[in-house]
Image (spheres, rainbow, N blue to C red):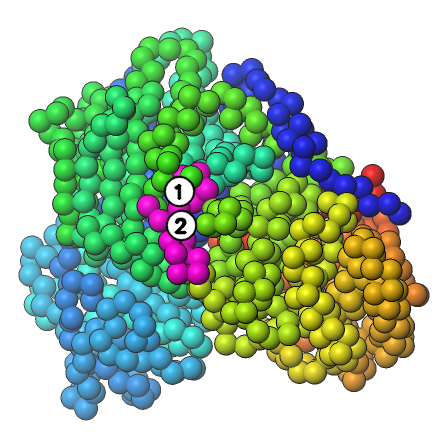
């Protein structure tokens, strides 16, 4: 079979074909969808500016970062004097009565030994317990003053507090953070319990109903808590707060009629009394425009439509707070109203501005600035109750004397509202749009130099310039986004039907937003992933490998942009081992590998295999020529060590390390074959024949040693085992028949006999799976019907999982529960069948 070159010029032609679209199309998805995403992308740009709704209804709760930190954006619509909430939950302004550790190093009695029954009761004798300061937990976590981090350990805490009659009045909230399982009591009465669910949650807010408030009384009270740490970080902190925000009970909740998710846009429709409101959240992540792909801003488009044929007076409000610009809520912030080129902006950021200072996994950005411009509306900076009062009463923002030019806030209760309002007037149908953006100032550090994202062109383009372009080109950009939505959906539908198309449409922004695009000093295009929720590494090779299909289909230059720095790391002499590095650091600092263990066969095989695929798509070896000596060293390592792997780490290391791993051996074999293909394209006939013969010999030995009746083993020395052999997909894509007896003809039917309700397990050891690898494996199915047998359980998992996070790629195939990982770029692997089909043409 001939591999067809997927050229970038043709790709650009396809994207540019749609230059305009009827205005009505802006508020109608290319195709309606039935898939309920566990978390819906709203405003997404990169690993830091990433806001989602983990709810079925957009009003069911506060919008959140993928880490689950609150990043609240509220949306209201006022129609003929009645106000409807269409986005977010009611915003509380909480003042501490019993503060948490970010305000006070509070003291409590605690023990690490399981106490006697009744330890939660006020009269329990805790005189032999220690007295320490909060918070309690792992020393690297915020505000920890008492260390507790042992694996599979517990802590019991009793905090005595005095409450006045005034304290007990009003709207009370319990706020707590815990890692992992957690329970809390007021004066012996259980208030909250996670059960056996192991989860890390920060800043959870629990409203105290009248019944729960009755468990507290004037005078001395005991708040008791228990927390169990399974593994990793441990944490415990809690406090009691009063909501001093305005009463917004007069605001009605809009009825959500639909939500549809396309590749670049999320479409909502709400019923707000006599009008319907359409809202579209768009991230202009166009593969053919690197400035838009890396854009720090996105669109929120909105339209009102009368449902009774009569004109109605309508106004829209969007509001947020400095919460979007902090990592921890206690960080002091400064918010301002500024003007640039005749456009007014409200902006906010931390006072400290620790640019690129924090590295790690589950963190939010606390440098740079949030911007909300007045394009198509008005903006202001004022206290949230003041903003709400003016809007509810008049449909306007506060008067100048009630707003501020600058607000410095030392705590969340002092945060101002950054508000945007649009007055439709009295209309039957009208539409417009808002912009929201975040300038990180410096976005990433690479080899000890700080870089801006691609869109900024090393500082030549400002956030104001970029937003002006987005406003100026709104219609054409939205049309191009719609064209991409169509292409993603249609490609998925052609390869796997409606459910596959919906999975791909719901995954596109998820994948792109896990990256940062920039150029280094030598002009190299670099596209670095963040290993979200799995350790925070930057540009991890075993993320670059599984996510590759998306980029190999639509823009191979971005695939190269993930690999160039790894090649250069070895070429420079900074990485001297005979195999590829695992990563380049911890996001956002890419200064060299930090991962504690190497993955020799894994990463060498990944890099060579992808390099071979890129050369085939390019029709030449120009990309890899400068790295040929490095690649040769890696290929020789695969030849020497890949036939029967020792006990090495691999990308599925969380499943345990077994020597003689059959799938890892397949990876090595395909890497050797890939090297032979590149050598052939370089005109090195003798080298190509030598390594291709070696690959075929290794494959023949593999078949003999791995065969286990009607399938193939997980490990060569382990009969009655099985595993997904997803690495074998390249043999099909390249049509080189390295494996002489087509092992997948046995494997695919066998997999269908061991598949569970929510997918095919990774191997025989556990019920959990990796959904990216399922789609790699499924791409080897012989027929669309057989492929669909793998797609349907994945669609069901995404649609039904109770784990409300951006799709978790590591999940239980029987319960649909997330096991670990979320918001990771690896689900770019879902496009493997599309890639396979494109290569046939």
Q: Is residue 222 above or below residue 201?
A: below
Tell me the crowding category of disc 2: few under 14, some 14 to 19, or many 20 or more residues within 10 angstroms, Cα based.
many
Q: Position of residue 127 (x, y in %)?
A: 16, 88
742 vs 536, left or right, is right
Q: Which residue is at a point 51% across and 69% down the rendered structure image?
A: 574
**Distance from label 1 to label 2 (Cα)?**
7 Å
Q: State whether residue 184 appears in this view.
A: no
Q: Position of residue 506 (x, y in %)?
A: 58, 42
Kindly identify which residue carries mark 2. Answer: 451
Q: State whether residue 559 appears in this view.
A: yes
Numbered circle sitting on residue 458 = 1
Which residues fall within the magenta stretch?
441-456
User: Looking at the image, which residue sits at the far right?
Assistant: 741
Which of the two discs, 1 and 2, labels the residue nearer the N terminus?
Answer: 2
Q: Nearer the viewer, residue 498 or 646?
A: 646
Image quadrant for the C terminus? top right
**Magenta region includes residue 443:** yes
Q: Which residue is at a point 55% across and 58% down the rendered structure image?
A: 565
Q: Secondary structure at mark 1?
A: helix
Determine whether label 1 and label 2 are within 8 Å by CB.
yes
């Amino acid at each position: 079979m001939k591999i067809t070159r997927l050229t970038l010029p043709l790709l650009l032609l396809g994207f540019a074909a749609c230059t305009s679209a009827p205005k009505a199309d802006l508020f109608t998805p290319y195709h309606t969808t039935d898939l309920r995403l566990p978390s819906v992308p709203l405003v997404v740009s990169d690993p830091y500016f990433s806001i989602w709704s983990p709810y079925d209804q957009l009003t069911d709760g506060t919008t959140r970062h993928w880490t689950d930190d609150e990043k609240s954006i509220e949306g209201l619509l006022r129609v003929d004097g009645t106000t409807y909430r269409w986005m977010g939950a009611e915003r509380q302004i909480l003042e501490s009565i019993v503060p948490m550790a970010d305000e006070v190093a509070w003291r409590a009695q605690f023990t690490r030994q399981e106490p006697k029954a009744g330890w939660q009761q006020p009269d329990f004798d805790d005189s032999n317990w220690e007295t320490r300061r909060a918070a309690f937990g792992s020393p690297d976590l915020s505000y920890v003053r008492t260390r507790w981090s042992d694996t599979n350990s517990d802590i019991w805490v009793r905090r005595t507090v005095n409450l006045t009659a005034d304290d007990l009045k009003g709207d009370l909230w319990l706020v707590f953070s815990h890692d992992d399982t957690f329970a809390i009591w007021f004066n012996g009465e259980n208030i909250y319990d996670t059960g056996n669910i192991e989860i890390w949650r920060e800043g959870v807010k629990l409203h105290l109903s009248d019944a729960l408030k009755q468990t507290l009384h004037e005078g001395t009270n005991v708040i008791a808590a228990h927390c169990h740490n399974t593994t990793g970080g441990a944490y415990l902190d809690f406090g009691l707060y009063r909501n001093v925000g305005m009463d917004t009970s007069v605001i009605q909740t809009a009825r959500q009629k639909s939500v549809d998710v396309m590749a670049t846009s999320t479409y909502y429709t709400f019923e707000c009394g006599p009008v319907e409101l359409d809202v579209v959240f768009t991230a202009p992540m166009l593969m053919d425009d690197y400035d838009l792909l890396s854009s720090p801003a996105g669109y929120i488009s909105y339209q009102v439509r009368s449902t009774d044929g009569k004109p109605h007076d309508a106004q829209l409000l969007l509001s947020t707070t400095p919460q979007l610009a902090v990592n921890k809520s206690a960080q002091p912030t400064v918010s301002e109203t500024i003007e640039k080129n005749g456009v007014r902006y409200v902006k906010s950021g931390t006072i400290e501005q620790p640019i690129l200072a924090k590295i790690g996994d589950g963190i939010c950005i606390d440098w740079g600035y949030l911007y909300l411009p007045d394009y198509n509306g008005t903006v202001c900076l004022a206290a949230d109750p003041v903003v709400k009062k003016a809007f509810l009463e008049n449909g306007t923002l506060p008067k100048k004397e009630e707003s501020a030019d600058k607000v410095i806030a030392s705590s969340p209760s002092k945060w101002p509202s950054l508000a945007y309002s649009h007055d439709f007037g009295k209309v039957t149908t009208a539409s417009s749009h808002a912009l929201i953006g975040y300038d990180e100032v410096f976005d990433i550090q690479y080899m000890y130099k700080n870089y801006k994202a691609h869109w900024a062109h090393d500082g030549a383009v400002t956030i104001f310039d970029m937003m002006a372009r987005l406003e100026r080109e709104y219609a054409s950009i939205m049309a191009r986004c719609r064209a991409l939505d169509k292409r993603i959906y249609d490609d998925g539908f052609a390869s796997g039907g409606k459910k596959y198309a919906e999975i791909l449409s719901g995954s596109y922004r998820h994948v792109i937003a896990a990256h940062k695009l920039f150029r280094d000093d030598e002009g190299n295009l670099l596209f670095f992933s963040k290993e979200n929720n799995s350790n925070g590494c930057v540009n991890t090779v075993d993320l670059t490998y599984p996510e590759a299909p998306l980029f190999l289909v639509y823009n191979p230059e971005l695939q190269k942009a993930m690999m160039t720095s790894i090649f250069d790391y070895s070429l420079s002499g900074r990485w001297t081992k005979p195999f590829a590095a695992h990563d380049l650091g911890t996001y956002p600092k890419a200064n060299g590998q930090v991962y504690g263990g190497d993955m020799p066969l894994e990463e060498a095989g990944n890099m060579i295999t992808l390099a071979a695929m890129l050369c085939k798509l390019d029709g030449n070896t120009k990309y890899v020529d400068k790295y040929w000596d490095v690649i040769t060293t890696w290929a020789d390592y695969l030849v020497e060590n890949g036939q029967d792997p020792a006990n090495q780490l691999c990308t599925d290391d969380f499943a345990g390390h077994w020597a003689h791993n059959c799938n890892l051996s397949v990876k090595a074999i395909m890497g050797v074959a890939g090297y032979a293909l590149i050598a052939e394209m370089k005109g090195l006939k003798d080298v190509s024949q030598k390594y291709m013969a070696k690959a075929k010999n290794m494959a023949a030995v593999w078949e003999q040693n791995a065969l286990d009746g009607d399938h193939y083993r997980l490990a060569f020395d382990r009969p009655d085992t099985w595993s997904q052999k997803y690495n074998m997909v390249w043999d099909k894509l390249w049509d080189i028949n390295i494996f002489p007896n087509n092992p997948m003809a046995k494997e695919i039917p066998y997999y269908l006999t061991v598949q569970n309700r929510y997918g095919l397990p990774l191997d025989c050891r556990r019920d959990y799976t990796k959904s990216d690898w399922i789609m790699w494996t499924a791409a080897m199915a012989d027929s669309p019907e057989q492929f669909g047998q793998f797609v349907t359980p994945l669609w069901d998992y995404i649609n039904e999982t109770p784990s409300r996070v951006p799709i978790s790629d590591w999940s239980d195939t029987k319960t649909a529960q997330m096991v670990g990982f979320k918001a990771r770029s690896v689900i770019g692997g879902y496009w493997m069948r599309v890639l396979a089909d494109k290569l046939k043409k």
